[in-house]
Image: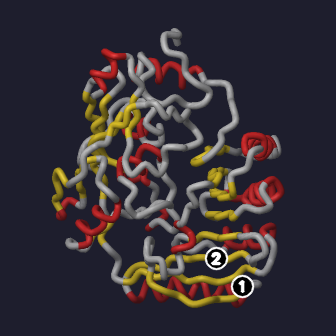
Amino acid sequence: MVRDAVASNTMVRAMGAGSWLHGGPVVNDASATAIRPCAGVMEYTPGDLVITVHAGTPLNALAAICADSGQMLAVAPYGAPHATIGAVVATAAAAPLAYDELTIRDLVLGLTVVTGTGDIVRVGGKVVKNVAGFDLVRLHTGAFGTLGVITEVSVRLHARPIMDHVVTGTLDDPPPLWVPRLLANRAPLPMLVRMAPGEPAQLFARCTGNPARASALRGLVQSYGARHAFTLGPSDTLGAHDPTAPTALLHHVPEQALVLRARTTPTFGAVLIDAAQRTFPEATVLFQPSRGSLRLVTPHTADADRRVAAFMASAPPSMPFSTVVEQGASPPRDPHALDVKLKHTFDPAGLFPQRRPAFTPGVSP
């Protein structure tokens, strides 16, 4: 299909479940021809904790296959359970309360990609230590399909923990107080704070492992609550896509919404939260203390471009800061020379979606 597109000078775009087609970092061309990778398992050796699947494989199908062997993919990203593994890799999708705070970048071992010239490129492999030279696996992870169509994915799996539950509670103090406390009292467990308008901040802490470890981690959360303004709530088993689970509201992403994620050093976390809430007072904000990462979900408005630009400009000069619009508007920015050169190398005819601002085919890097 890509080679035919090269011959006919036709735009193409990879699609999985179609839930991220309006991603903010890329230009959406409704006239582009859809390419849908296959679904299904290609190779699975439970003893190696590695599985290779077609990129169109839904996450819930992948989870069911791995569960039969007592294994799991360590991340359950935001969004619907039928999202595909190829789209998760292409968007470097974040995941709330991921096991051991891993990201999809930590788990992808190898990829097969069809470039804009129609060449089939296999990068990485099926073992953890497989990178020599330029890491093309990480280049395509998070490229939003702008450099090629991901067709096959090899990922590292983890054994399902014996106990896996989430402890919840409310934080009664403002972020300038609880952000440094969470950093100072950080236990080896994933934590996430949800802040919605008119509601107290809610802490989620994932406790996993054997019964002794999981109980000890819960004790650390209880100890924190006893020392600070923290009201401990109930705990429940983790259910990433179970609508009755306490984490269900974390995963839901409205279709007509502006979604962006930003990151700074953890010590600047309160500053980042303040900037987000001042610029988007109606938004729901999710903050991961250990990484200093923030995810913001708000209704899409006509002035979304301006508000996103204002948020990006609100960071103090001394604060390290990066942001990406995952869904919705994305303000213009000047292209980096490296972006232009990479695009020209992998997609010289400009067949695939383009990062904003638009890449002009034929322009020398």
Task: Locate residue 66, reporting x and y percent.
Answer: 25, 67
Please name whichever residue, 317 or 363, is drawn nearer the observer in this view of the structure. Answer: 363
Residue at image position (53%, 21%) is 340
Q: Which mark is residue 21?
A: none
Quarter-of-image position of residue 271 = bottom right
Number of residue marks: 2
Task: Locate residue 238, reporting x and y percent.
Answer: 45, 78
Q: Earlier in the sequence, mark 2 or mark 1?
A: 2
- Above or below, 28 against 231 in this view is above
Task: Locate residue 194, reporting x and y percent.
Answer: 66, 70
User: What kind of element bears circle 2?
Assistant: strand
Q: The residue under label 2 is which amino acid type?
A: Leu
The answer to whether one can see residue 130 in this image is no
Q: Which residue is mark 2?
A: 203
Circle 1 crowding by C-alpha within 10 Å: few under 14, some 14–19, many from 20 = many
Q: Which residue is mark 1?
A: 230
Name the quarter where the N terminus is drawn: top left
Position of 78 with respect to 232 (left or right) is left
Residue at image position (65%, 70%) is 193
Position of 364 with respect to 43 (left or right) is right
- Above or below, 316 against 227 in this view is above
Please name whichever residue, 2 or 265, is drawn nearer the observer in this view of the structure. Answer: 2
Q: CA distance from mark 2 to mark 1?
A: 9 Å
Q: The residue under label 1 is which amino acid type?
A: Phe
Quarter-of-image position of residue 277 = bottom right
Residue at image position (30%, 30%) is 114
Answer whether labels 2 and 1 touch (C-beta < 8 Å). Answer: yes
